[in-house]
């Protein structure tokens, strides 16, 4: 998954009525600390990530409360977007279900 895809995903999420920010659009850009990103997600957002660091943090500390880990393997971006769109309602339901477990 390339950074350009993550920008496209943010735009698509915004078009679906969700607030979405890419880390590069934050004041410290891609150097934004993990702690700050987790704090942003704690205010009601969902952290979408391809990085395992956030998955490990969630397992250890329960933070961020809402996490969408995206593991895509070798799929190209053109093939990935339709899958995201097709599965998005299931992803939303899973994230909401996990919220009740915290």
Image: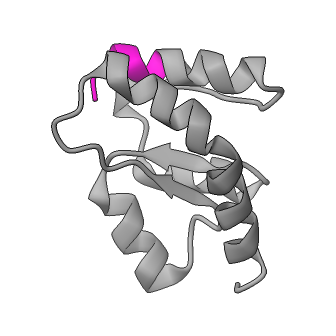
- Specify the principal SS of the magenta part: helix
Q: Percent x, y for residue 28?
A: 45, 25
Can residue 27 be seen in this snapshot? no
Instruction: Pick the residue in front: 68 or 45.
Output: 68
Residue at left offset 66%, top offset 47%: 40
Residue at left offset 73%, top offset 61%: 93
Q: How many marks?
A: 0
Q: Percent x, y for residue 46?
A: 65, 50
In reply to whether residue 3 is colored magenta, the answer given is yes
Q: Is residue 16 above or below residue 49?
A: above
Q: Percent x, y for residue 5?
A: 39, 19
Can residue 14 be seen in this snapshot? yes
Q: Is residue 81 left or right of residue 71?
A: right
Q: Is residue 100 above or below residue 9?
A: below
Q: Which residues are magenta?
A: 1-7
In reply to whether residue 46 is colored magenta, the answer given is no
Residue at left offset 67%, top offset 75%: 98
């Amino acid at each position: 998954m390339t950074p350009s895809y993550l920008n496209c995903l943010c735009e698509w999420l915004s078009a679906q009525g969700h607030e979405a920010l890419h880390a590069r659009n934050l004041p410290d850009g891609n150097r934004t600390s993990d702690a700050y990103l987790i704090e942003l997600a704690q205010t009601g957002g969902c952290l979408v990530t391809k990085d395992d660091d956030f998955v490990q943090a969630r397992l250890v500390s329960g933070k961020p409360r809402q996490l969408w880990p995206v593991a895509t393997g070798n799929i190209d971006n053109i093939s990935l977007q339709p899958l995201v769109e097709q599965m998005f309602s299931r992803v939303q339901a899973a994230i909401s279900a996990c919220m009740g477990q915290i």
